[in-house]
Amino acid sequence: MKSLWILLLPLVFLPSLGLGSQTALGLLELSDYLIVPVVVLMWRAGRRGPRRLADGVWLPLAFFIGWSLVSTLLIRERYGYGSDHQTLMGCSKLGKFALYAIAGLLASRALDDGREAQRFGWALLALGLVVAASLAWFSGNGEAVRSGRALEGYKTNNGISVLMAMLLCYFGGLWLTGRGTPRWRVLAPPAMGLMIVGFLVSQGRGGWVGGLAGAAYLLYRLRLRSRVVAGLAAAAITVGAAYMFLPAFRLAVDRTIDPDPNYLRESVQVIPGVDDGDRLYIWGLEAAKFPSSPILGTGFFHRGGASGLFSAGSHNFFLQIALETGAVGIAAIVALFATMWRQAGTATARAAGQDVPIRAALVAAIIGGLSGEYFYGSTPLMGLMLIYSQIGRLPAPARIEASVPRQDNGPIDSYPGAPGSSDLSTASCPAYVGVLNSGYVDTYLEPF
């Protein structure tokens, strides 16, 4: 019963399957219903324990939610609306953001022993396969909401493609660094191949760019090892086959490489093949509105109307957060990402072999977030926090941190006792000593 939430977790990432419903405050997806029992089960499975790395993430997250709530509650008074609709809309969106972010972080609290960690690792892989299969099945139906039809697939495939980019970079990082049990290492490559197919038919070019950035980070950290070369070759073959046999992917690639000249002539300002959605132009227009409310912002999800912001958003998560929650809000979000990045480089994370995979996923998330507001809530945000929970659940003893020099920018095998290094003695790596003494050895060393 304690692990039931792990079994149900992949279901939260199903598309709406025609079960979504439109309300006065926005769209309710199937995930919005399924996440509630999963969160309850997560909470009941959690227990008090030693300080975890995730404790450092709760503070900027809570501060951001609190600050955004204040800004949103003041919308009516600041902008002179005759009703509370804008305030209620912003509060509902903020509530959704909080729900999905906290749901992902609760996994850090609920995962304590090795068996649960192994099940959770397999659940993440199953989650990726569920999303990939759904993208392939509903390929081309990602804009059902905009067309007014009943929602069947995902609300937006662009956000889901960023989720897939994070998962692929994380799993790829684990496999390339030699992590995982023998069974996981055999099953992970074909699973990632299926995930790549779903990723490519999503037509989410923001996710593609984020995935390429995460892959470039992996290449930088791991250098040209034989395992990396084999992975790159397999990925190239998969992409080539997808271009030949998947018309949706071929169309998106052709549109990027050779865009329609008639469309380019009509666009205001475009970098052909890169910015045919006028994103750079929109960023410039929207960024110029920041000084009108630099501290409080316009209020969470307060767009259009008296806000002066584009109702469709700036197509940049970080810029939009700055516009809607001010300098204080964006500072909290930057602190949130910076904390996760820093923790991924700690001795505890390196000893667990999670540093490079987590950072690769973060690179994919940050670059993907520059092309759209994909972390306002829903499954991409939860997916990011679930991936982070693989280090968030680790203990954060200060003694271990002080005993191991930081080597954030070196290759993965640059510290003693790392997988693949010549010195595997625990005495040469105090981080391993701390992990072994912590009682988490099964959980940390081979989570799958």
Image (spheres, rainbow, N blue to C red):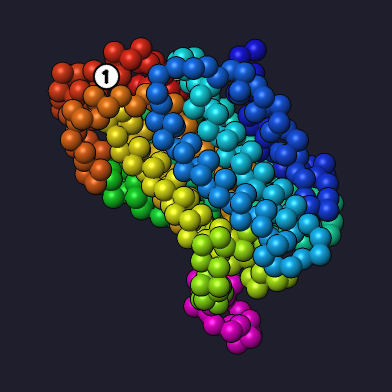
Above or below for 92 versus 268: above
Residue 136 spot, x, y in % from top left: 66, 47
Is 212 covered by the magenta stretch? no
Other residues around mark 1 within 10 Å, as few (<14) / some (14–19) / many (≥20)? many
Is 274 covered by the magenta stretch? yes
Q: Mark 1 belongs to which amino acid?
A: Gly
Residue 155 spot, x, y in % from top left: 71, 52
Above or below for 21 versus 112: below
Whether residue 253 is visible here, answered yes or no, is no
Residue depicted at 47% across the width and 43% down the height = 60
Above or below for 251 versus 207: below
Residue depicted at 79% across the width and 42% down the height = 17
Q: Quadrant of the N terminus?
A: top right
For the magenta stretch, what is the residue range?
Answer: 256-281
Depth order, front residue of 301/195: 301
Quarter residue 71 falls in: bottom right
Residue depicted at 49% across the width and 27% down the height = 108
Quarter residue 45 falls in: top right
Q: Is residue 212 left or right of residue 445?
A: right
Q: Mark 1 points at which residue?
A: 434
Depth order, front residue of 171/191: 171
Whether residue 99 is visible here, answered yes or no, is yes
Q: Quadrant of the C terminus?
A: top left
Q: Is residue 98 left or right of residue 424?
A: right
Depth order, front residue of 360/435: 435
Residue 272 spot, x, y in % from top left: 51, 77
Residue depicted at 60% across the width and 33% down the height = 103
Residue 167 spot, x, y in % from top left: 50, 41
